Image (cartoon, rainbow, N blue to C red):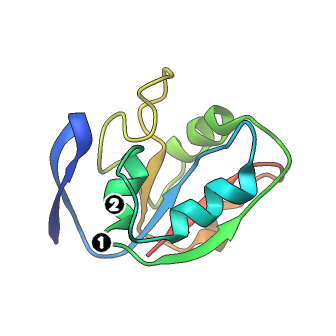
Amino acid sequence: MINISVGKLGQFSFPAGQYLYVGRAKKNLEARLKRHQRKNKTLHWHVDYLLQYAILETIITYDVNDECGLARYLTCQPGITLPVHKFGSSDCHCESHLFHLVGSLCSLGLPPGYAVFLNS
């Protein structure tokens, strides 16, 4: 368990394990992904705060921009918890764009066509 301050959202406790973050870049996807992989950067997005402590394990990209559709899908899946309300979703109506995996990514049966970042 680690306590992390996530910008204006506040302080949260993150249990050890794997996390799934859903995001998108409207342009310059390659540059955004390279930025996420750097440790030394200005903390701007919610995921920046988590990535100071997490290991970016896998990046899966798709050419579709419906991050909220995937977030809604994941919210209803067994083996998923929402550790931080409004994480990565302060600009939409989703509960969160960060998910703590209790099971495996393979068991989620993710539909094709979404941008997914997996953090461990």
Q: Quadrant of the C terminus?
A: bottom left
Give the x, y percent position of residue 12: 17, 51
Q: Out of 6 and 38, give the one closest to the viewer.
A: 38
Residue at mark 2: 50
- The amino acid type of the residue labelled 2 equals Leu
Q: Residue at x 38, y 68 (%)?
A: 40
* Vertical side of 10 occupied by 33: above or below: below
Q: Quadrant of the N terminus?
A: bottom left
* Vertical side of 74 occupied by 118: above or below: below
Secondary structure of the residue carrying tag 2 is helix
Q: How far apart are the two marked residues, 2 and 1, measured between alpha carbons?
A: 6 Å
Residue 84 occupies quadrant? top left
* Vertical side of 117 occupied by 47: above or below: above
Residues under numbered marks 2 and 1 in contact, where contact means CB atoms less than 8 Å apart: yes
Q: Residue at x 35, y 51 (%)?
A: 43
Q: Is residue 110 visible?
A: no
* Vertical side of 39 occupied by 110: above or below: above
- The amino acid type of the residue labelled 1 equals Tyr
Q: Residue at x 37, y 73 (%)?
A: 54
Q: Is residue 85 visible?
A: yes
| Badge number at residue 53 | 1
